[in-house]
Amino acid sequence: MVDAEGAQIGIMDTRDALALAREKGLDLVEVSPTARPPVCRVMDFGKYKYEEAKKTRAAKRKQHSFQIKEVKLRPKIEGHDYSFKVANARKFLEQHHKVKLTIMFRGREMAHPELGQRLLARVIEDLTEYGLVEHSPRQEGRFLTTVVSPRPAKGGGTKPRARLESEGEDGRAPETPGAEAPPAAAQQEPQETA
């Protein structure tokens, strides 16, 4: 038997333990039923359940849920379409979603899977800055697929650096009214003489 403060009371009869819990206005909770004798604790069970639910909600808030977004391509894709699809994949990776890249083959395109493999390698190369390939490309019937997951954030986040109050629009410190400008000779680049 353990009391509400965590101090051990000792072995007690069940009726005596229930009476002690009622006297304090708390509940008698069986903590370890497999121990011999079973361990019980006097506590406010409603408060305990509330605190546990609060902890699980906080843990869920810290978790990041992601989705798998799919980008479909064809082996004979034009330049503009290619850049548009890669830009979409890049956007999904920046939003911390996984991207499934799918190359679809039709008809006689199945005779040349190396075209799809070259295209997929090019897409993966264009996305290396934003994501990591989870598994090597797989041929599944008429489709060649792979999954790219977002790169982990470096140093605590992907948000841009906050501009300091002392910095101007261009990121440099603004000139103060009383500050002297560097001499004209220092501003000019040295000229080479032959």
Image: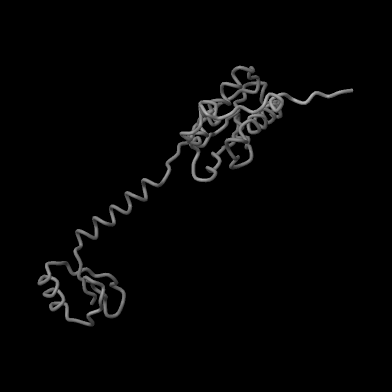
The residue furthest bottom is 11
Residue at figure coordinates x 23%, y 73% from the top left: 40
On the image, the x and y values in percent for residue 86 come to: 58, 26
Horizontal side of 193 relative to 101 (left or right) equals right
Residue 187: name its quadrant: top right
Residue 8 drawn at (x, y percent): 25, 78
Indicate the quadrant where residue 31 lies.
Answer: bottom left
Residue in the picture at 13% in, 77% down: 15
**In the displayed structure image, the side of residue 157 where residue 53 appears, left or right:** left
Q: Is residue 42 above or below residue 58?
A: below
- Is residue 76 left or right of 16 when viewed as pictured? right
Depth check, front residue: 29 or 43 = 43
The residue at 49%/45% (across/down) is 156
Q: How many marks?
A: 0
- Colour basis: one colour
Q: Quadrant of the N terminus?
A: bottom left
Residue furthest to the right in view is 194
- Quadrant where the C terminus sits is top right
Seen in the picture, residue 61 relative to 144 is either above or below; the reply is below
The x and y percentages for residue 27 are 16, 67
Q: Residue at x 54, y 39 (%)?
A: 150
Q: Nearer the viewer, residue 192 or 82?
A: 192
Position above or below: 119 against 10: above
Residue 101 position, x and y percent, is 57, 31
- Front residue of 150/14: it is 150
